[in-house]
Image (cartoon, rainbow, N blue to C red):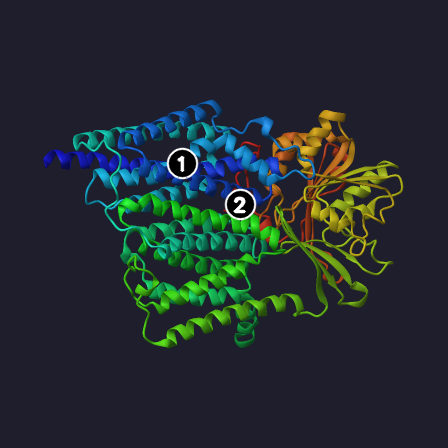
Amino acid sequence: MATSRNRERWLVPIFALTVFTSAFLLFQVQPLISKFILPWFGGSPAVWTAAMLFFQAVLFGGYLYAHLTTSRLSATRQCQVHVGLLTVAVAAVLLTRIMPPAWLRPSGAAGESPLARIFVLLGVTVGLPYFALSSTGPLLQRWFSQVIAGRSPYRLFALSNVGSLLALLSYPLCIEPLWGGRTQAACWSICFVVFAVCCGICVNEVRTARARTAADEPPSPVSSAPAGGWRRTAWIALPALASVMFLAVTNEVCQNVASVPLLWIVPLSLYLLSFIIAFDHPRWYWRQGCGLASAATLLLMAGYEPMTGMFATLCGDSAGAFFDHWWVETAVYFAGLSLVLLMCHGELARLKPAADHLTAYYLSMSLGGAIGGLLVNLVAPQVFTTFHEFPLGLFASAVLATLVVASGGAAAPPAAGPAAVRWSRPVGRVAAGIFGMLALFGIWHWRLAADEAGDATVRTVHRARSFYGTLSVQNRTAGGENANFTFCSGHIVHGSQFVLPDRRHLPLTYYGECSGVRMAIEHVQRSSERCHIGVVGLGVGTLATYARPGDRVRFYEINPQVADVARNTSWFRYLADCKGEVEVVLGDARLQLERELDAAGPHGFDILCLDAFSGDAIPAHLLTAEAFAIYDRHLRPGGVLAVHITNTYLDLYPVVRRLAEHQGFQHTRIYRAAVPEKMLFRNCYMLLSKDREFILATPEDIEAMPPRFRKPRDVPLWTDEYGSLLPLLL
């Protein structure tokens, strides 16, 4: 007996350490490898969601491997197979050091599938070690239940989510600001080897423990009754709904509420935290309280904008203005998400089986998560032109909340089926739940109607969605002579043009009179009769209006749907009416510029305007030392690099200033306040040039700039290997 207790004192910590380390490495490699490949795919936020889909699919594969291994192989064979997998994975890590090979870089050509290329790249780079890490958790938990009697393996699942959460939070706060990508990859590779050694020790201890009990035989039939079909369905449906809501709320917040960088960390943290709470101990999940709170926040999420307007009417504009802040709306979304996730995972934890069905349970959970990812990342973009998966997820969550509240405080239902659920006697609860769902759906349609028809002078004439996000075109007829078409990416306006023929040549939004880019273009046009203008980011092609006969304008645009919008003369005519020569190059601008250097040498741009927005932020891969070296080579001597740094939440000036100094550019900054009656938005440009006289003749003008953007900051030089937004957020 004493020997058994001593063995448990040794086994429990080593199992816990190995499970914790595997989960930590799983969630460290996701942002690490995503950051490596981000510059190869245009810096789109969709790179992260595509990577998440890949990791969910591999996680399902790892859980399937664990289930088949423990259910069909003898004890000794299980250990041998997993040691073999770990050995091959360690060899792959030491060989590649999880650095993406250059031969897998996308061509940047139009028509190339970024999603397929990302899957291939991730599979070659981290597929095998990620598979090994994914399979280790359920395997070790199953072995733990077999060699240590009386201990619940589900506590190890909660511990693994603690490791995942710690990895997720430590990466942007500690790892990314301190080390470059290559150092991060090297450290991760070393940690993976340490993990493999710990896992090998666990395997050896399992083998030894089984040898002592003469357990080296094919597994005997399970002792507990198999789970019923409805329960297995719930094992899949609940995590699928949680996955859909997690991804849908992330998309909704990042695209239509606020494009604050690193915002995806919060919903993913809530996702992991809900697992920790639900699986640590049943006392943390109060069913009816969570169901009622979920129903209330779902109603608030669905009707936030109409309710905000109603609150402003009742309590005054100042009170309504408080609820109109992006961070208040974001907090509401995240509060609702956290409750829905806790409800989904709390119900999932109530349905957990005995330990001999553990791997089948985890396999079903991972399948549900993968299905949710497929629905949001693959199905929804093909079926919907906007984020309709969000209201559908709200409705499904409301259905679940109704069922949870109506079932009262019933204990975990047995395997007999749904009839075993003790529905509460009062029919009023069910009726209230149904009424709540109808109200939720009605409010959502009210919200959509308000967006579409709340202002009769604004009509959406086009919507589209792709890997790079959503876009729309609106016909705005208010103001008579100011009638215009407006192009939006997500909720950010990316260009407008007046409808009247005698006014449609006027540059609007960020590019009008006195803007920094206009000053730069007029300067180079005074210096040359024929100017070559390069623009990274097409929008609606507004800058083409500045071209004179003989000038050439070359646009770079990664999203073909944007090019289709800009070329549609029913909406926008900047390209069609351009007096000079216009060329639109499809594909990632940085990759195209790099390839053009190798193929034909520098273009000799008189001015190169960096105007590629992703939501409300310039893609970070365009703001690195390596990228600026490419821009410098493409400029003629004395040419101007105009960097558009207008941003709602971030001050990109310190980043661009550091890059300019590194590349030897002189620089100045021009800020202009909004002029609504002329449809001119506030805008800020940094003008960089090695022509010192031009910079001296264009002094910095930031008199109208808000104080928060004047705060002096010193940031490290951004490179392809290192770059952190954290200093800009503090």
Please state if 91 lies on the left or on the right of 632 as rendered: left
Please state if 674 lies on the left or on the right of 578 as rendered: left
In what quadrant of the picture does the N terminus appear?
top left
Mark on residue 49?
A: 2
For mark 1, give the secondary structure: helix
Q: Which residue is mark 1?
A: 25
For mark 2, give the secondary structure: helix
Q: Residue at x 83, y 56 (%)?
A: 504
Mark on residue 262?
A: none
Dot 1 surroundings within 10 Å: few (below 14), some, or many (20 or more)?
Answer: many
Query: Label 2 amino acid?
Result: Thr
**Earlier sequence position, callout 1 versus callout 2:** 1
The image quadrant of residue 531 is top right
Q: Can residue 180 be seen in the rendering of this structure?
A: no
The image quadrant of residue 22 is top left
Viewer-nearest residue: 152 or 657? 152
Viewer-nearest residue: 314 or 299? 299
Query: Label 1 amino acid?
Result: Leu
- From the top left corner, tell me how far across and down residue 646 is, in percent: 65, 49
